[in-house]
Amino acid sequence: MTEDRFRALAEAYGADLRRWPLAERDAAQAFLEANADAAAAILELERALEAQLEAYIVEPSPSLRGRVIDIAPRARAVDRTWRWITALGLGLGLAASVVAGVAAGVSFVPGSVARLIGGGEAANTADDSGLLADPTDALVNG
Amino acid sequence: MTAGENDTDDELVRRAGRGDAAAVQSLVARKLRRVLALAERMLGDPAEAEDVAQETFFKVWRYAARWRPGVAKFDTWLHRVTLNLCYDRLRRRRERPTAEPPDTPDLGPGPDRGLLAADVGRRVNAALQALPPRQREAIVLCHYQELGNIEAAELMSVSVEALESLLSRGRRALRQTLADLAASE
């Protein structure tokens, strides 16, 4: 491995060789052992950046955990209703109305999730159409 | 029925789809932080990130009963759903610019964090949000979410070479922005 390639990999993947592409790790390790000082200087620059990146911590709140758990039964009910409607061959407009009715019993639903339940705009976002076009959609529509 | 640490993602999803409350809780314990972290680092706004996390899990619960193990990795699917929701919101921001910038995360000192760490965290968020979305996505997927290069490239629909270019440019820009922010404070 050349120094240029070692540097390019460090600049992309950082200071930890365990995160480097599997196929290049042995060569990178060999370069590091043969060129300790040069390699150390390259890696130290990336290590300093990563020390800063690690200061940005994200933790879910207990209330978020509770809300995510609480919506599970209603989401399953929505899926059952959609599948029942699809099996009956009903139109999408009627389907959205029925599903909205299913969701009516939810005591607290965030606006974004309510739109998903009601089959409104959010249900036709790029996410849903992306899923439909995605080969992995066989997972959910098979 | 109990759900434990040894259950695979596929097993937990299938059992959650059958209404197994323990499986639901285990999946949340295993994946919520990961989903929220991806959303917040992509959007820079904790409230929007919570919305995305809820929407993501709504889709998980909605489709869980029909999940077919072995066709794709659940974690990859989860990332794809979360990213699509994030990009929807980023697109809506561009289409409806507002006078108010998104809320910045409260990275204030918790019991385990000092003032200095919280300041650095806020600067990192600002530096990440200053990146073009694709560079930000590459760094979030590879550095924070610890995805391998092949998996990250597939999620982003780019080649590994393109991913490396996004990562290098993004990391260089981050380093410069963080240095500028530190110097200006």
Image (cartoon, coloured by chain):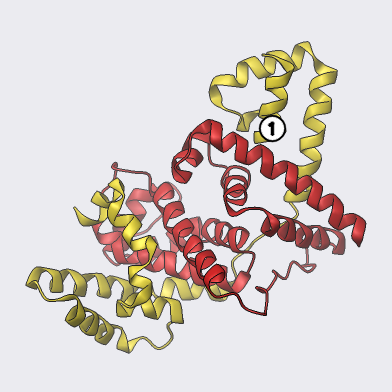
* Percent of width and height locating residue B74: 38, 49
A107 is higher (above) or lower (below) than B168: below
Front one among B172 and A79: B172
* The N terminus of chain B: image quadrant: bottom left
Callout 1, which amino acid?
A: Asp
Front one among A93 and B53: A93
* Percent of width and height locating residue A128: 33, 62
A29 is higher (above) or lower (below) than A49: above
Image point 14% across, 72% down: which residue?
A84
Image position of B182 (left or right of A75): right
Q: Is residue A29 visible?
A: yes
Front one among A108 and B111: A108
Image position of B66 (left or right of B57): left
Q: How many marks?
A: 1
Front one among B91 and A48: B91
Q: Chain of mark 1?
A: A
> Going by the picture, which residue comes out furthest to the top?
A34
Could you say which chain is coloured yellow in the image?
A
Image point 46% across, 70% down: which residue?
B54
* Percent of width and height locating residue A34: 77, 11
Decide: few, some or many residues near mark 1? Use Cα within 10 Å; few <14, some 14-19, many ≥20.
few
Q: Is residue B60 visible?
A: no
**In terms of image quadrants, where is residue A25?**
top right
Image point 71% across, 43% down: which residue?
B171
Image point 74% across, 41% down: which residue?
B172
Could you say which chain is coloured red in the image?
B
* Percent of width and height locating residue B106: 72, 71
Quickly name the residue at label 1. A16
